[in-house]
Image (cartoon, rainbow, N blue to C red):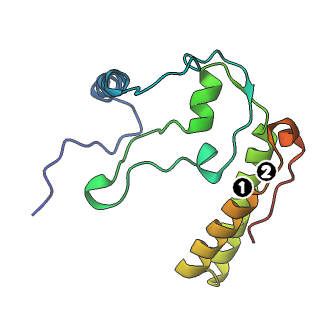
Amino acid sequence: MEPRTRARASAEETQRERDNRRVACRAAAESIVLLENSGVLPMVPQKLALYGAGAGMTAKGGTGSGEVNERHSVSILEGLEKAGYTIATKKWLDDYRRSYRRALLKGLKSGALGEEDLRRCCRNVLSSILRNAPAAEATKAPARDPG
């Protein structure tokens, strides 16, 4: 039995996809609840430091019923940049992403990287991110090779 879906395998984005994206964006904006604002919000675009693997490689959805398949997901980094923020740690995040991908590809190609190795790699990288310099020193933070 073939699955019954209206999904298309085409690389061309459909009007339906554009319409659904607009509805989802509007629904998300209308669903936000702010419990307390101590004068911090709304923030004006400014220079800020952004740390963590999820900044540029933001996890979306999950597996099973939580799986999300779309043409493009906006990462935290991309969203802040589009909103006009200057990310002081941009070079560090780019270096980290390249280093992460190199280590991942190296491990996958050699067959030496198993599931537990991947988990350990992620934990080590995250702990090194958390120990990094404060925002004022953010642009000086060296990329750490997870491999």
What's the CA distance linking mark 1 and mark 2? 16 Å
Q: Residue at x 31, y 27 (%)?
A: 31
**Camera-side residue of 87 and 35:** 35
Q: Seen from this angle, which residue lies furthest left?
A: 1
Q: Residue at x 85, y 36 (%)?
A: 136
Q: Amino acid at mark 1?
A: Leu
**Camera-side residue of 21 and 43:** 43
- Which quarter of the rendered picture does the N terminus lie within? bottom left
Image quadrant where residue 120 sits: bottom right
Tell me whether the residue at label 1 lies in contact with that at label 2, contact meaning CB atoms closer than 8 angstroms.
no
Q: Position of residue 123 (x, y in %)?
A: 63, 68
Q: Secondary structure at mark 1?
A: helix
Q: Residue at x 62, y 36 (%)?
A: 77
Above or below, 123 relative to 60: below
- For label 2, the crowd category at 10 Å Cα-Cα, with few meaning under 14, some 14 to 19 and many 20 or more, is some
- Which quarter of the rendered picture does the C terminus lie within? bottom right
**Camera-side residue of 66 and 73:** 66
Numbered circles on residues, count: 2
The residue tagged 1 is 130
Residue 114 is at least partly visible in this image: no
Q: Position of residue 75 (x, y in %)?
A: 55, 39
Above or below, 38 relative to 13: above
The residue tagged 2 is 95
Q: Seen from this angle, which residue lies furthest right?
A: 140
Q: Residue at x 37, y 56 (%)?
A: 62
Drawn side of residue 56 relative to residue 133, left or right:
left
Mark 1 vs 2, N-terminal side: 2
Q: Amino acid at mark 2?
A: Asp
Residue 26 is at least partly visible in this image: yes
